[in-house]
Image (cartoon, rainbow, N blue to C red):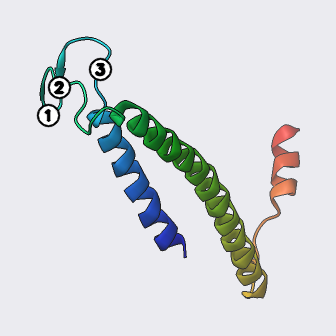
Amino acid sequence: MYTFVLILFVIVCILLILIILLQSGKSSGMELFGAGQQNIFGGQSADMLTKITTVLAILFLVGTVGMAMFQARRTSLVDRELQKLKTMMPQPEQQAGPDTNMLLKKTNK
């Protein structure tokens, strides 16, 4: 599921980049596909490109927030599973040795 959503998100990102590059600039500089072309797709192209850009930008923002929430939930599930595994594992026995508290008391005197 996460892989499918990630692939859709990458497609939205690529489409958003291409649509932004297709839009004509406000100044009379060089455009992407030729100098001086105002409307590549006809008279309504500026309105159509603006609407498509808006929809893709909204999909990008919603996708970013949704994927961040999904990833946070996945991470918390992994953390819980790791905690379960740690409690199920046998604890290593402590080796007999000098008590560190006793050593600290002796050095502080």
Q: Please, what is the three-letter code of the amino acid marked with disc 1? A: Phe
Say which quarter of the image contains residue 18: top left
> In the rendered image, which residue does mark 3 sit on?
25
Marks 3 and 2: CB-CB under 8 Å?
no
Q: Please, what is the three-letter code of the amino acid marked with disc 3? A: Gly
Which residue is rendered at x = 42% and y = 53% of the image?
12
* Inter-mark Cα distance, 3 to 2: 10 Å
Q: Position of residue 84 (x, y in %)?
A: 76, 81
Q: Position of residue 60 (x, y in %)?
A: 52, 47
Q: What count of labels does the image hold?
A: 3
> In the rendered image, which residue does mark 1 sit on?
33
Which one is in front, 10 or 58? 58
The answer to whether residue 95 is above or below residue 100 is: below
> In the rendered image, which residue does mark 2 sit on?
37
Which one is in front, 3 or 8? 8
- Which of labels 1 and 2 is toward the front? 2
* Inter-mark Cα distance, 1 to 3: 12 Å
Which residue is situated farthest in the top direction here?
Answer: 27
Marks 1 and 2: CB-CB under 8 Å?
yes
Q: Secondary structure at mark 3?
A: loop
